Amino acid sequence: MARTALVTGGSRGIGAAISKTLKAEGYTVAATYAGNDEAAANFTEETGIKTFKWNVGDYEESKAGIAKVEEELGGIDVVVANAGITRDAPFHKMTPEQWQQVIDTNLTGVFNTVHPVWPGMRERGFGRVIVISSINGQKGQFGQVNYAATKAGDLGIVKSLAQEGAAKGITANAICPGYIATEMVMAVPEKVRDMIIGQIPTGRLGEPEEIARCVAFLASDDASFINGSTISANGAQFVV
Ligand SMILES: NC(=O)c1ccc[n+]([C@@H]2O[C@H](COP(=O)([O-])OP(=O)(O)OC[C@H]3O[C@@H](n4cnc5c(N)ncnc54)[C@H](OP(=O)(O)O)[C@@H]3O)[C@@H](O)[C@H]2O)c1
């Protein structure tokens, strides 16, 4: 029987590429989103992948949403915690609201997404937890104290989950993308984009599909012994 995969923020950007790649690999995929109904409807029409709407920052919403996905599609074997936001500001101008929104979505959102699927994975003796972190969680970034804190925290989550889940056939790993050609990055002025590209030894932005293929590998049986790891996919911009 096909394995079921849940991709948070799976209707746009990197998440959309992950959802499509996992579907092409034979998974039954559920993609979630926060509020952009139009993008989600277009995505479902284009791909046939079902979309579900909830705020990953809210535990009760996440739990109820995941229960609905499992009722419709079966127990979740692969969970990709991808939903994420930025609220950038230099630290001296960063507001408590900017701090809290990013913590709620990028860090607590991972807890809220993985915690409800964890018991089912333990019972079935199989699971794949894949968290989309960031290069800026590894190296820090001017104007992103909040974002970098959450993305570094995501690495702590997978390292700990790996140790707790290993005996139950569950792996937990992170991917740290560098700068990827999503709407967000393509929307910055061309001059700034050129400056970013200038810092990438490979000489280009990454493609969402390049992150999606890392996810497909980590989800596969071939990756059973990779647990608690971080894949950096950044064109040599930052070498750990
Ligand atoms: N793009 C990059 O260069 C880059 C680099 C490193 C890491 N990343 C990480 O990769 C992930 C995806 O980034 P992206 O650039 O593809 O983002 P994106 O294009 O802005 O898409 C974000 C997705 O997450 C959903 N989302 C946002 N907040 C949510 C919430 N509170 N609850 C549920 N869903 C929520 C959005 O839903 P709506 O469609 O409803 O808004 C959307 O589907 C993020 O974790 C990001 O930090 C990105």
Image: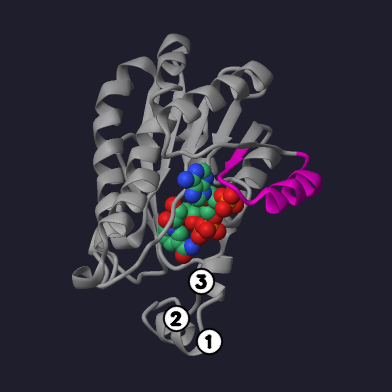
The residue type indicated by label 2 comes to Ile
Residue 54 badge: none
Residue at the disc numbered 2:
197
* Span highlighted in magenta in the image: 31-48
The magenta stretch spans residue 42 = yes
The residue positioned 43% from the left and 56% from the top of the image is 85
| Label 1: element kind | helix
Find residue 234 and report its horizontal and vertical position in percent: 40, 65
The residue type indicated by label 3 comes to Val
Nearest the eye: 67 or 48: 67
- Residue lying furthest top: 123
Labels 2, 3: front one: 3
Determine contact: label 1, label 3, CB under 8 Å. Answer: no
Find residue 198 and report its horizontal and vertical position in percent: 40, 85
Nearest the eye: 159 or 143: 143
Residue at the disc numbered 3:
185
